[in-house]
Amino acid sequence: MSEPTIQHVLVVIAMEPEAKPFVEHMGLEKDEELFEPHLPFEAYSGTHKDATVTVITNGKDNVYNTGVDNVGTVPASLATYLALHKLKDRVDLLINAGTSGGFQRKGGAIGDVYLTTAVSHHDRRIPIPGGFIPYGIGRLESRDSNSSDDGGDNKNGNSTVINPQKLADMLQYKTGVVSTGNSLDKTDTCDQHMMANDASVKDMEAAAIAWTCALLQKPFLGIKVVTDIVDGDIPTQDEFMANLATAAKSLQTALPQVLDAVIGKKCSDL
């Protein structure tokens, strides 16, 4: 069976404020059918260059009654799984887009756009022999990456992470590893693990979404815009909130550029 060209892209964005400028810019409409009505997740759909674009967000918390955006690995992986399961074979590529922390030590700056070469976790520390350490790290490399890690001979596992180097060169974006954790801030131990992961950006969802893509064998591409400098002097929460709107507008620009570059092509040609 020949490889299909990319005609349906599923874009997964955690927070509604991150997604809103892109959704409005693309003229996407609310999709009431993708998720069951009792779930918090939101979906929008439309077309771009004769291809279908579906955007999902994690929606608002209705479990703890806070009303804030659902963030972190649990809602991200569940929303991704449900969307992919409902859309089945119609999705040709999944893009995880969103904000992230960057690192001065890796040359990161506010507003930088990164395409992700690999994903890892920095807060799943399971020091038990027999495979639990690499399982906790959960590293998934881009499919033809030659970089090394501690995960053993089968370092890529069932990874579906696309090597983004050609796209990055074309669009003049940076590339790097995204390290995922469920806290906005970091501990010294987290920082040690992020350095071990060779992280260029830090987020709260990418590794979980890439895991879901590996589970269902759907190609994964990550796009991250830097809102804060993890190893800088400004408290993360203050810098994140100050730059969130600007980063969301940057995604509004970056995402259509990526869509223009991938639609109609085969994933193996990216």
Image: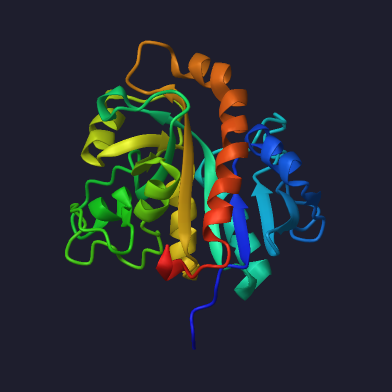
Q: Is residue 135 above or below residue 125?
A: below
Residue 141 picture location, percent across and down: 31, 56
Colour convention = rainbow
The residue lying toward the viewer, choosing from 204 and 228, is: 228
Q: Is residue 187 above or below residue 21?
A: above
In the picture, the quarter occupied by the C terminus is: bottom left
Q: In this view, does 13 lie to the left or right of 235?
A: right
Residue 236 picture location, percent across and down: 45, 19
Q: In this view, does 75 lie to the left or right of 49?
A: left
The residue lying toward the viewer, choosing from 57 and 91, is: 91
Q: In which quarter of the image is residue 151?
A: bottom left
> Which residue is most to the top?
233
Q: Can residue 61 be seen in this view?
A: no
Residue 101 picture location, percent across and down: 42, 29
Q: Quadrant of residue 64?
A: top right
Please state the total of marks drawn on the protein image: 0
Q: Is residue 133 above or below residue 212?
A: above
Q: In which quarter of the image is residue 166?
A: bottom left
Q: Can residue 164 be seen in this view?
A: yes
The residue lying toward the viewer, choosing from 43 and 58, is: 43
Residue 125 picture location, percent across and down: 29, 42
Tell me what residue is drawn at x 41 percent, y 41 percent: 172
Q: Is residue 89 above or below residue 69?
A: below
> Which residue is most to the front?
170
Tell me what residue is drawn at x 54 percent, y 77 percent: 4
Tell me what residue is drawn at x 49 percent, y 16 percent: 239
Tell me what residue is drawn at x 46 percent, y 67 percent: 267
Q: In this view, does 102 lie to the left or right of 20?
A: left
